[in-house]
Image (cartoon, coloured by chain):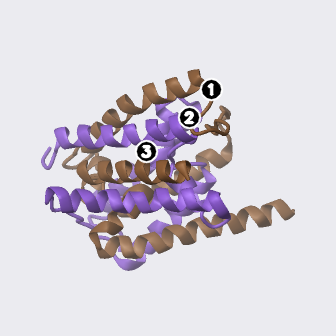
Chain colours: A purple, B brown
Amino acid sequence: MSDFTPLSALIGGAFIGLAATGFVLLTGRVAGVSGIAAGLFSARGREFAWRAAFVAGLIIGAAIVVKATGIKLEVRSVASVPGLILAGLLVGFGARLGSGCTSGHGVCGIARLSPRSLVATGVFMATAAVVVFIVRHVMGLPTWP
Amino acid sequence: MAVILAALLCGALFGAGLAVSRMVDPAVILAFLDVAGDWNPTLAFVMAGALAAAAPGFWLARRRGHPALGGDMQVPTRRDIDARLVAGAVLFGLGWGLAGICPGPAIAGLATGARAFLVFVPALFAGFALYALYERLAARK
């Protein structure tokens, strides 16, 4: 069990949870990234503006952490370009079909004990674990080719 | 205007949290999913921190019954488990397991300029668009 960083995980997690708390108390909405981002396609006017602001905020917040703290953010991705494209398509389509992703179901949904979110989170975590098992331990590869 | 500012600030706090907790590193995600390998429970601790901070918020929001900045509560109310929910979660899990990247970290990770996110994010939005197309075709039948 290497590369385990429990303290920064809890602190960063609390930031995410506080963001979800602030967002629902202020706007009455769930801070689900896939729903907010996908809505950019069809939303107009104010509806578009707050969605764009949230998405821009995600990037700005991460950028502030990099600039202000000097933390070097590691991005160790070994996936190939076709692998990343396939993964992006699956994640995007699946998040919409399943009404949420790791933030909407995994954080906001479980926080309010939604049965749909508990099931969705269990299913996508189990599915992803099976994929990782097959790629790493059955195929013996560092990543999907 | 207030809603836009709230979205910007909450988005920024969310993005900062994803960066601090190292969720923008696909290797950390894949190591959490790799239960048969060198397992890394970091993601579980991120979820624990997030749930501890979000659960009181949703409880309070429900009790208050209306958002501070006006309008109606838009928190989902459905409780039924249907095939779309499960199928969507399976497809999502397939992609998540392949790359170790999900929507929040992908977008926040653009701040790093890493190539993985520059490839993944357009594909993610293409996936959103494909779903919108699928929904429109399904509605026509």
Q: In this view, does A18 lie above or below B88?
A: above
Name the spot of residue A11 as percent of width and height, x first. Answer: 24, 39
Chain name for mark 3? A
Q: Residue placed at 33% from the left, 64% from the top?
A: B109
Q: Where is residue A66 in the image (x, y as percent from the top left)?
A: 21, 61
According to the picture, the residue beneath numbered tag 2 turns out to be B68
**How far across and how far down the image is residue A41, in percent?**
63, 67
What is the residue that sits farthest to the front in this orientation? B1
1 and 3 marks on the same chain: no
Q: How far apart are marks 3 and 2 (CA)?
A: 37 Å
Residue A126, label in figure: 3
Are the residues under badges 2 and 1 in a single subunit?
Answer: yes
**Which element is circle 3 on?**
helix
In the rendering, which numbered label is found on residue B47?
none
Q: Which mark lies nearer to you, 1 or 3? A: 1
C-alpha distance separating marks 2 and 1: 10 Å
| Residue, far bottom | A81
Q: Which mark is residue B65?
A: 1
Q: Which of the two residues, B119 or B12, is positioned nearer the viewer here? A: B12
